[in-house]
Amino acid sequence: MPEPSTDWVDVGAAAELAREPLREVTAGAARIALSCVGGEFGAVSGVCNHVGGPLGQGQLDGEFLVCPWHQYKFHRRTGAGEPGYEADRVPSYAVKVEGGRVLVSAKPVTKRGHLTHAPHPLAREPVRAAGPIRVAGISTTMMQPGFPRYSTSEALLEVALTHAREALAAETQLIRLRDLAFGACEGYYSRAARACTWPCSITARDAADQMAVVYEAAVHWADVLLVATPIRWGAASSLYYKMTERMNCIQNQITTANRVLIRRKVAAFIITGGQDNVQAVVGQQLGFFGELGFVFPPFPFVAHSLGWDAEDMERNVAVVRGSETLREGARALAGRAVEAATQLVTSAGADTARLTLGSRGGRKAHGP
């Protein structure tokens, strides 16, 4: 234990500090997570090993501090990681009470330790592999498993993908969000910008989180993203918003790391429904996907709606089923998107060109 008294920092009155089980204090320039359980104080670094979350602003789980950002745990007195991860530790500080004051050692008495983790596969740099234009279609329609119904937006998406594959020689894949098991966004960005990580911390800690399928397609595989949604109460589907909330981590890399993940990629949209509000739905889509880095072909969406005063869903389905005009519109949308992607890929210099960092646009982020 460090001596003499100059090696200690007075962080406050013991009676006052004991009133809260966990708080953040400072010892010189160091942020300290100070805890008190059963009258016994503990002091460890207030900076989490993961991405620097404020441990002193978290909570206690028995003898362990829980980081408020991503729930990493460290022993409140020793700094060791939770059982099985003890070597992943934060520095601990000596602490004592003298004269009714809490004193913390000026320097840590144990060192920080990191376990070696293999990078997540999604964390690799986006490098376009050689080959034809690749088109990923994402259907955001929800329906009951085992009892499929006709989805107007998904039907037109399938028409577009078939045309891209058979007439335009593109590689295609169809992603139905309803078939994926993925968690909802946990709002880490609302806590701190750096708490929203790439890959998303939900995907990074849960190998079963299938949002990885969307991330892989959007960031690494596809040249074109075709997103199809029904209109629900004048807005895109709930699955669409569940997906886009989880895609905020892609955009946030621009804000926090000066890293643009989406380059030379095209997005286009299919919107159908028995209610109106097409312009508002597509406006949100253009704004969101534009902020991720996607560009758009001329006339970047096809849409169909009977309008608010003609909400006849049976007739709406029949209209779409029988409309060659809508199917031709979906094919033409695929054609415009593939043409735009071809021009972008060609402008990179070669199909295998590495995606280099360029303009960050109007981003408000700090950094170079």
Image (cartoon, rainbow, N blue to C red):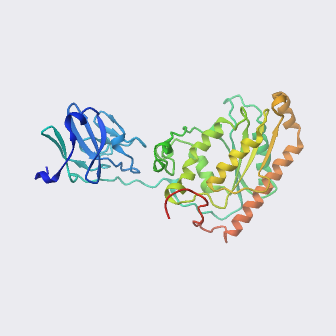
Image location (x, y in percent) of residue 366: 49, 58
Q: Is residue 359 left or right of residue 304?
A: left
As drawn, the residue found furthest toward the left would be 4
Q: Residue at x 83, y 52 (%)?
A: 332
Image location (x, y in percent) of residue 18: 24, 34
As drawn, the residue found furthest toward the bottom would be 349
How many badges with numbers are in the image? 0
Camera-nearest residue between 310 and 212? 310
Image location (x, y in percent) of residue 20: 29, 33
Q: Residue at x 49, y 48 (%)?
A: 196
Image location (x, y in percent) of residue 40: 20, 35
Q: Is residue 83 visible?
A: no
Q: Residue at x 89, y 43 (%)?
A: 324
Occupied quadrant, residue 237: top right
Q: Residue at x 16, y 53 (%)?
A: 7
Occupied quadrant, residue 85: top left
Q: Is residue 150 above or below residue 121?
A: above
Q: Is residue 105 above or below residue 41?
A: below
Camera-nearest residue between 220 and 269? 269
Q: Is residue 217 left or right of residue 29?
A: right
Q: Is residue 366 visible?
A: yes
